[in-house]
Image (cartoon, grey):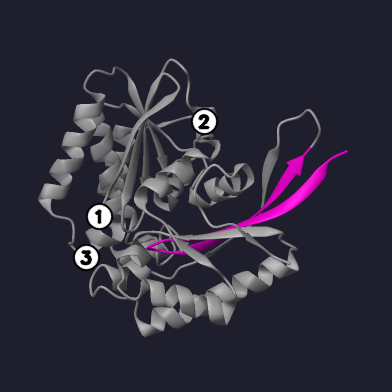
Amino acid sequence: MIKIKKYAAIDIGSNAMRLLISNVIEEENKPTQFNKSHLIRVPIRLGQDAFTVGEISEESAERMVKAMKAFKLLMDVYKVEKYAACATSAMREAYNGNDLVEEIAKKAGINIDIIEGKTEAAIIANSDLASFIKNDGHYLYVDVGGGSTEFTLFSNGKQIVSKSFKNGTVRLLNNMVTESVWHEIEKWIKTHTADLSNVEIIGSGGNINKIFKMSGKTNDKPLTQTYLVQRFKYLNSLSYDERIYTLGLNTDRADVIIPAIKIYVNAMKWSNAKHIYVPKIGLSDGIVKAMYYQNTKIKINEIL
């Protein structure tokens, strides 16, 4: 007989925030299944405030409170038993981030955990990433966010090294990434992949997911560096309005997608990777598994 639990993950990023509701299915003598039930995305660009003026604006804070109230209601409706809410670089860097956490706890009843880059990478490693990593291969996992990019190197089935850099799409849009940061990333990738052959990239994040969807490829097929460069040139040739009207991109995707491709292309170039695989994984997926296995330091909240 199966047992079904409902868990929820709230991912508060620099470009958007997401609520993932998952069915955790347990059956005796069988591996636990994690099935996505609902995913809701709200485009609130906290990084625009945090990275430029150092604080979350009053308008963004009000929208965030409303979003968290809505997430709380949805969790109640779907009878979620446990949830974890994790905020990343924008909330880390905003000087009023902790004040906003307290305000949301009071007004919306949601307890938010502001996590570090290393914890973020560890949570993502909890996702289905392992199923894409072969024991005899070398993989550079690249997760591009609005405020930071997490790089994790896997070799022969084991995680070797991981690092978070302050280079994300919202920062790039605001010209807040210096050449020294790019050089630091290049040096890190080249140093750790120098002795490895046939490195392959695994990409995650909303932008690479969109690029992959636009390619029309099936989930087990990778994209090439050449394809990404062509997409970069094509998207760059279109105006912001054209990307929305012609390609049907969301308003909060149409601008950040170009700097995102730049990060992935550079990662491929510096690691000499010919292919990038795009599995449907992300922070929210990892949060659900981190709650279930309790193998990462995040705050787990029970809904009574």
**Residue 20 visible at all:** no
Q: Main secondary structure of the magenta part?
A: strand
Residue 158, disc? none
Residue 2 is covered by the magenta coloring: yes
Residue at the extreme left: 180
**Residue 218 x %, y %:** 53, 34
Front of the two marks 3 and 1: 3
> How crowded is the residue under tag 3: few (<14 C-alpha within 10 Å), some, or many (20+)?
few
**Residue 145 x %, y %:** 36, 53
| 228 lies above or below 100 | above
**Residue 35 x %, y %:** 68, 45
For image coordinates 47% across by 62% down, the residue present is 113
> How crowded is the residue under tag 2: few (<14 C-alpha within 10 Å), some, or many (20+)?
some
Please, what is the three-letter code of the amino acid marked with disc 2?
Ala
Residue at the extreme right: 1
Please, what is the three-letter code of the amino acid marked with disc 3?
Asn
Cα–Cα gap, marks 3 and 1: 20 Å
- Residue on which the image places disc 3: 174
Viewer-proximal residue among 54 and 248: 54
- Residue on which the image places disc 2: 130
Residue 213 is covered by the magenta coloring: no
> How crowded is the residue under tag 1: few (<14 C-alpha within 10 Å), some, or many (20+)?
few
- Residue on which the image places disc 1: 237
Q: Which callout, 3 or 1, points at the residue further toward the start of the chain?
A: 3
Viewer-proximal residue among 250 and 266: 266
Q: Quadrant of residue 150?
A: top left
Residue extent of the magenta highlight? 1-26
On-image quarter of the N terminus: top right
Cα–Cα gap, marks 1 and 2: 37 Å
